[in-house]
Image (cartoon, helix red, strand yellow):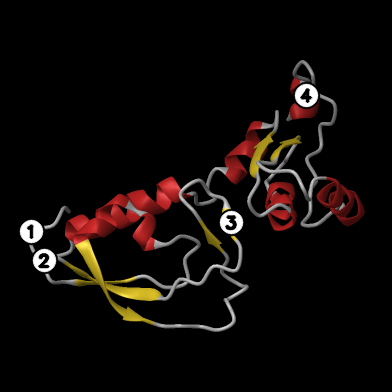
Amino acid sequence: MLRLRRPENLFRYRGFTATNRYPRIFGFIQQQLAAQPDVRLLSFGGSTGAEVFTLRDYFPTAFIKGIDINPRSIATCEHLIRFADFERQVTDFARCLKDGGFCVIRHTKFRFADTHVAAGFEPVLQVVRKPPDKTTPLFDRNNCRLMDAVYSDVVFRKCLGSYG
């Protein structure tokens, strides 16, 4: 489609990407920026997002933005969950839950405690995993990775008269 439309400033009409596609380049940049606070990265031509997620592994606390000219690539990325999406979902769950009801949240990328609605709940069960679960990394409200974070709260009880 892009080949036919040929939008202005199009450099490549094929969107190919893969996870950790440039380990030598990313490793080099990681070494160069190791001492820099507040790293900000732009992935230009990020396609479907694999490169941005790879960059997150190399730069867990950096601000990373991925952009692409291809609307199909952007649409593919837009389904990926962000904290705002997570918070919207758990807020909707809380609205449906009766006072005193239980909410179980396990194996998510975000901490329930970071949501606004969590103030109306009390954690009632923790499941501690040591070492931290590498298959489910945790991210904060700004979608930045929390290195070696452990979040053990998994069952929450809705407080009487709380929001939702």
Percent of width and height locating residue 32: 86, 46
Amino acid type at mark 3: Arg
Mark toward the start of the polypeptide (3 vs 1): 3
Along the polypeptide, which appears first: circle 2 or circle 1? 2
Numbered label attached to residue 4: 4
Image spot of residue 73 (x, y percent)? 66, 39
Residue that appears at 74% across and 43% down: 36
Task: Say above or below: 72 vs 116.
Answer: above
The reply to whether dot 2 and dot 1 touch (C-beta < 8 Å) is yes
Q: Of residues 104 and 3, which is closer to you in this image?
A: 104
Q: Amino acid at mark 4?
A: Leu
Q: Is residue 102 left or right of residue 82?
A: left
Which label was assigned to residue 161?
1
At horizontal 62% and vertical 73% (from top left) the residue drawn is: 134
SS under mark 4: helix
On screen, residue 7 above or below 158? above
Of the two numbered discs 2 and 3 in the rendering, the one whose residue sits closer to the viewer: 3
